[in-house]
Amino acid sequence: MPDAHVASDAGDAAPAADADALAADLEAAADAVADARDRVDDVGETELRALRDALDGLDRLFDQYEADATGTGDFQSYIAFQDDLVAFVEDLDDDLPEREAFESLLDLFKKRRLSESDFAEARGRLADARDLVGRLDDLRDARAEYSEVRKRAAERADEYADEVARLERLRRLGDADLDAPTDELRDPIQRYDGAVREAFREFRSSAPARDVLGLVETARAYPLVGFDPVPDDLASFVAARDAGAEPIPQLLEYADYSPSKLDHYVGEPSALKRAVGGNRTYLDRLDAAPLTVGWPPAPADELRHRLDELVSVVARFAGEDVVAALHDVREAVRRDDYRRLRDAAVAEHELTDAEKREIEAGVGDDLAAARAAERRLRDALAEH
């Protein structure tokens, strides 16, 4: 159940405590971003990025020369290092933060012989500069943490929204009149569903494949009916080839024939094998399910629109008795007490034993808590 998942994710915390904790985490993360942003702005983001580039450039210079320019190393490397270091420092912007620390290296390295300790001291003199550059990393990390906390808060708010919907459903079904005469809905729906299944089964087994698939294509103009579209190659084959006049079961049987045997029955057997054999799964699954109402039925507003579309499709292949049965369903859905009967049908059909026990225990307090928790998190997300 969704509420169980929420509790589990929150360490079994009550919704109010869970939402408060997440909201506090979000506020803290937002404050951390603001603080990190202020520390960057105190120096300037552009200036800090330039300082980082300068430190990276100096590190590359040290890596290039340190081994050869120290001790009794290569004197030419020592001279080249001195020249490159002077050029590097002179090229730095005058307003670069900690520029003095870079300039101090010129005196530090103005010796006849360099040692590893000189390079270690040089790096130490730049520690403050590296701390300043670290503010950029702090801002990046604070933003990443804020994004993660915000994601958790949004996901938890969605979980509470799902829990609200679940509990509202239970409360509604708990109020259902289980003594309501649901047979007055069930009987016309079952009559129609059975009749349309049989009519479509007969239509599919005896009518030309191009007519059956043509009906499916026509039904695409009625999106609430819900047929899957006919694969393009199959639609083209049955429309253009003589074999399209055969019923679907016959085409499927042909697709199992060997090419030499099939050659006696249809022209271009390879085309049939590609179009029919390649779409066997689609043809095998093609049935009346998209034309049925099902039990328990959908809400009235949704079902009324769908029934209007079903009438337009069913009348194209089924007999008057099937269409009449469909009209009986339409009349049942227009009843003033349809919602009462449907709620009772859904309660009878869908409620699990656990849900029935939950309803008996009462869902009002849990519903109020879930609503408050969702609202707390939505407010926190809007604020930060």
Image (cartoon, rainbow, N blue to C red):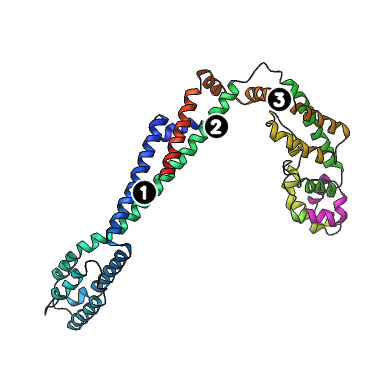
Question: In the rendered structure, are the residues bearing label 1 and label 3 in contact, judged by CB atoms less than 8 Å apart?
Answer: no
In the figure, residue 137 lies in which quadrant?
bottom left
In the figure, residue 200 lies in which quadrant?
top right
Sequence-wise, the earlier of marks 2 and 1 is: 1
In the rendered structure, which amino acid carries the disc numbered 3? Tyr
Q: Pinpoint residue 219: horizontal percent, then vertical percent.
A: 78, 45
What residue is shown with label 1? 145
Question: In the rendered structure, are the residues bearing label 2 and label 1 in contact, judged by CB atoms less than 8 Å apart?
Answer: no
What residue is shown with label 2? 165
Categorize mark 1 by other alpha carbons within 10 Å: few (<14), some (14-19), many (20+).
some
Tell me, yes or no, whether the highlighted magenta stretch contains residue 247. yes
Position above or below: 36 against 108: above
Measured in 3D between alpha carbons, the distance from the residue under mark 3 to the one under mark 2, in whole angstroms, is 21 Å
Residue span colored magenta: 235-257
Secondary structure mostly taken by the magenta-highlighted segment of the chain: helix
Q: Pinpoint residue 168: horizontal percent, then vertical percent.
A: 55, 28
The dot on residue 95 is none
Asked if residue 160 can be seen in this view, the reply is yes
What residue is shown with label 3? 338
Name the residue: 27% across, 58% down. 42
Q: Residue furthest left?
A: 112
Sequence-wise, the earlier of marks 3 and 2 is: 2
Name the residue: 28% across, 68% down. 56
- Indicate the secondary structure of the residue bearing disc 3: helix
Tell me, yes or no, whether the highlighted magenta stretch contains residue 93. no
Q: Pinpoint residue 13: horizontal percent, then vertical percent.
A: 39, 30
Measured in 3D between alpha carbons, the distance from the residue under mark 1 to the one under mark 3, in whole angstroms, is 51 Å
Q: Quadrant of the C terminus?
A: top left
In the rendered structure, which amino acid carries the disc numbered 2? Ala
Measured in 3D between alpha carbons, the distance from the residue under mark 2 to the one under mark 1, in whole angstroms, is 30 Å
